[in-house]
Amino acid sequence: MDKVVTLTLNPALDVATRIQSVAPEIKLRCGAPSFHPGGGGINVSRAIRFLGGHSSAVYAAGGHNGAMLRQLLTGDGIDNHPVEIAGITRENVVVYEESTGLQYRFTMPGPALSAEEWIACLEAIFNLNPAYIVASGSLPPGVPLEIYGEITRYAREYGIRVILDTAGDALNRAIGNGVYLLKPNLRELQRFAGGVIRDESQIRAAGQRLIALGLAEVIVVSLGAAGAALITSADCVFLRAPIVPIQSKVGAGDSMVAGLAMGLARGFELNDAARLGVAAGSAAVMTAGTALCRAEDAWRLYDEIHLS
């Protein structure tokens, strides 16, 4: 398996708990919390591990939350490389309301990174000599919006493929720098296309137009319960997600990226890597809370997914 390195500049310690019902102005007594590593790239590395693969996770980490993050990742058997920062790693809270089955997600801002700190993160990923870099998640204060574009430009010079899963201005600044694979959802694709997309032919047209403009070599559009569209300059195929019981949608996108990256690193054909991505994303919604995909679910679903 080729080496996959994930980058998370704004990781989090995710705290999950349960409560009978949420109400204002009163003290809410929650159940015992559970703690999980969080953040886009970190979740990709965790999902790759759960699928039976291997990756290395590079992330910024500071304070007691950063120390717990490292402890949890090490406990999961993930090769992890924290870059020490002065700030304290953020903490997110996920609350499951038992009376309604609703889930509340409270996401905190991350600590600011100095130039020395984010440069150290970039040095750490390239020092690991990856074949694939997965850059995923939001950017904390202090990190330039051009950073993903700089990563892809430098990676292209050394034959490293970048898989990018981000949004907004950070994505805009990466365009034209050599991203290998981009994973937007349908809403993000519509924003780039500049209009509402109503059918599969428009998905194909929009994706191929963006590829022609240099957005990426490959675009995998996440379509939620409908699966995904795999778009290249020459083709577009749709992968139908199997019907599964939904427990939580947290981590489904990161699990999809993990399946894609792991499949490519193992030498799968692009279509089969996309199948594994859809299978891993579907498997993730079958798990509760902040849990990610289970290998037995993902590989069973992989066999059920067909192209159209």
Image (cartoon, rainbow, N blue to C red):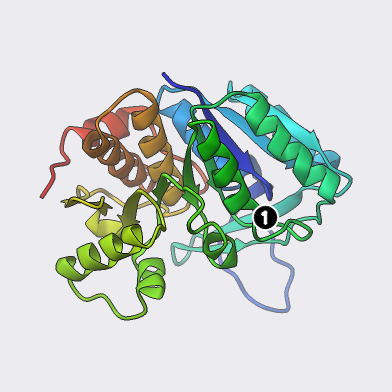
At a point 42% along the width and 50% down the height, the residue shown is 253
- Nearest to the observer: residue 74 or residue 274: 274
The residue sitting at the left extreme is 308
Residue sitting at the far right = 86
Task: Name the kind of residue labelled 1 in the image.
Answer: Asn
Picture quadrant where residue 294 is located: top left
| Residue 42 seen from this side | no
The answer to whether 173 is drawn above or below residue 269 in the figure is below
Q: Position of residue 231 (x, y in %)?
A: 25, 53
x, y percentage for residue 25?
73, 79
The answer to whether 121 appears left or right of 240 in the picture is right
Identify the secondary structure beneath mark 1.
Answer: strand
Front-most of 164 and 44?
Answer: 164
- 300 lies above or below 211: above
Query: Which sits in the foreground, 126 or 252?
Result: 126
Give the quadrant of residue 158: top right
Residue picked out by circle 1: 92
Tell me the residue at 41%/22% (across/down): 52
- Mark 1 burial class by Cα count in 10 Å: few <14, some 14-19, many 20+: many
Image x and y of residue 198, in percent:
21, 76
- Which residue is at a point 54% across and 36% down the rendered structure image? 157
